[in-house]
Image (tube, rainbow, N blue to C red):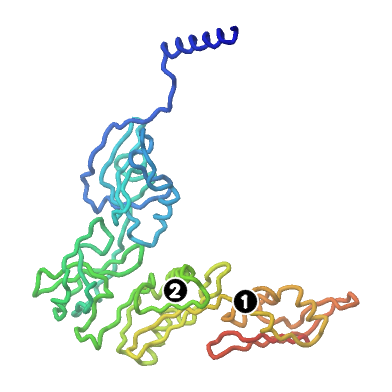
């Protein structure tokens, strides 16, 4: 009976408390203002900073649901695609004096609210203003250009994906294949690095707009086209990527590393009609022929090789070998104590078959060439030195087939 009475008394006390005062709950912000932005759309292009997430409504409002985490927003910030830009189009302030922007990604995939700082006259917090293009000098782009015979060679009111809802202007370029075009200005997409030209026609006023320069040629005779290639993202059909023994995601890494490490390859222009040795040597140099690409840990070194097909088109190939050189490909001769000592240390480090002689020596001996003397301890515990010679044998493709080390 005592226990029942205590419970009843407790309930009565609780009832008096709740009747007299409200129970504290999580407090939410409220909306003070919410309106569409009126400035020009080109001034409202933004990029995530990665410091704030994207929500269905301002993140401090009741019922706000997560669309993209801070980590996902950070990935968009670092993306190499212009699709990761956003257009801000609404602005709201909350009772906590915070500013939020409603944004939509350029590809329309994501739409929501992101914290934008505490000032209504500038972007902050989770977004920042983005220059989607960079100006390029077009003063030397004189003469006539022509559309290539490619259905994708359309023009737009802005370079592709550099503004929200870019519109096509010339949708059927095949109608104007023989129409000479003038280049009025040029721009480079900030993310991809690809170059776009703004073209127009004196004869046909409707023919105008921005177009990727790879869809243009300097002559309308397709047999003598000037190849204009952007290698920045290695997406051009003029590029072949071969990385032996690697999966597709590793091939993507090789493409990415190439576009960042071989800077002169980006949007390099060349005339395929000039097949002279001197011109092709310049092209090879610009496209990084012979460059060794550091693909990071656990990946082989990639080697850039540039060749030409029968039409003079440059072919970029990244060659790599993802296997260690097996023990059977080593020939060790000479002083037995030195060999035994050597076997116990650096020999089993990975030596990829396309390594240079200097890289081989560095991995085996810790220096860029075979040492004059190699120190070892003999069976009596005495420290000795042995003269070292090293020979690296290769096949016709330059891949290592054998490393011969002699301890004299």
Residue at (34, 85) in percent of width and height: 313
Q: Is residue 408 visible?
A: no
The quadrant of the image that shows the C terminus is bottom right
Q: Quadrant of residue 185?
A: bottom left
Q: What is the residue that sits farthest to the front in this orientation?
A: 1
Question: Where residue 170 sits in the image (x, y, percent)?
Answer: 16, 69
Q: Residues within 10 Å of mark 2 (few under 14, many from 20)?
A: many
Q: Residue furthest right?
A: 380
With respect to residue 404, does 13 lie above or below? above
Expressed as whole percent of the image width and height from the top left, the position of residue 89 reads 25, 46
Q: Is residue 31 left or right of residue 255?
A: left
Q: Which mark's residue is nearer the viewer, 2 or 1?
A: 1
- Rendered view: 283 above or below 42: below
Labelled disc at residue 262: 2
**Which residue is label 1 attached to?**
324
* Quadrant of residue 343 within the rendered picture: bottom right
Please give the name of the residue rendered at 44% of the width and 80% of the height, measured from the top-left corner.
317
Residue 381 sits above or below residue 45 on the image: below
Q: Nearer the viewer, residue 122 or 51?
A: 51
Q: Residue at x 9, y 69 (%)?
A: 205
Work out how far the residue at label 2 is from the one at label 1, CA to CA, in angstroms: 26 Å
SS under mark 1? loop
Left or right: 158 as drawn, with respect to 111: left
**Local SS, label 2:** loop
* Vertical relation: 91 (above or below) 171: above
Quadrant position of residue 230? bottom left
Image quarter hosting the N terminus: top right
The residue lying toward the viewer, choosing from 347 and 181, is: 347
Residue sitting at 13 percent across and 70 percent down?
Answer: 207
Q: Earlier in the sequence, mark 2 or mark 1?
A: 2
């Amino acid at each position: 009976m005592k226990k029942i009475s205590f419970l009843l008394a407790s309930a009565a006390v609780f009832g008096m408390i709740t009747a007299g005062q409200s129970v504290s709950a999580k407090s939410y912000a409220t909306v003070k203002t919410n309106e569409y932005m009126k400035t020009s759309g080109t001034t409202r292009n933004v990029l995530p900073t990665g410091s704030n997430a994207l929500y269905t409504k301002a993140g401090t409002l009741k019922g706000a649901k997560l669309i993209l985490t801070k980590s996902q927003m950070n990935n968009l910030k670092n993306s190499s695609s212009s699709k990761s830009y956003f257009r801000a189009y609404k602005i709201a302030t909350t009772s906590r004096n915070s500013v939020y922007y409603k944004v939509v990604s350029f590809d329309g995939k994501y739409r929501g609210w992101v914290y934008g700082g505490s000032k209504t006259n500038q972007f902050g917090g989770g977004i920042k203003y983005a220059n989607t293009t960079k100006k390029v000098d077009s003063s030397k782009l004189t003469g006539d250009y022509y559309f290539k015979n490619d259905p994708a060679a359309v023009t737009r009111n802005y370079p592709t994906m550099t503004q929200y809802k870019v519109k096509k202007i010339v949708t059927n370029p095949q109608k104007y294949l023989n129409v000479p075009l003038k280049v009025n200005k040029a721009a480079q997409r900030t993310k991809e690095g690809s170059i776009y030209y703004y073209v127009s026609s004196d004869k046909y006023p409707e023919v105008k707009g921005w177009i990727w320069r790879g869809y243009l040629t300097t002559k309308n005779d397709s047999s003598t086209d000037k190849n204009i290639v952007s290698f920045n993202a290695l997406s051009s059909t003029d590029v072949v990527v071969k990385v032996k023994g690697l999966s597709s995601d590793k091939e993507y890494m090789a493409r990415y590393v190439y576009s960042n490490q071989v800077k002169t390859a980006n949007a390099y222009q060349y005339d395929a009609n000039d097949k002279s040795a001197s011109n092709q040597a310049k092209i090879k140099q610009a496209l990084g022929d012979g460059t060794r690409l550091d693909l990071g840990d656990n990946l082989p070194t990639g080697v850039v090789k540039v060749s030409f097909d029968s039409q003079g088109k440059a072919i970029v190939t990244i060659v790599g070998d993802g296997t260690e050189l097996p023990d059977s490909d080593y020939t060790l001769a000479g002083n037995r104590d030195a060999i035994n000592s050597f076997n116990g240390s650096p020999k089993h480090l990975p030596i990829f078959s396309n390594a240079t002689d200097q890289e081989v020596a560095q991995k085996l001996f810790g220096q860029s060439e075979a040492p004059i003397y190699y120190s070892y301890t003999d069976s009596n515990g005495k420290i000795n030195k042995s003269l070292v010679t090293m020979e690296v044998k290769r096949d016709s493709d330059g891949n290592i087939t054998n490393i011969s080390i002699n301890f004299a």
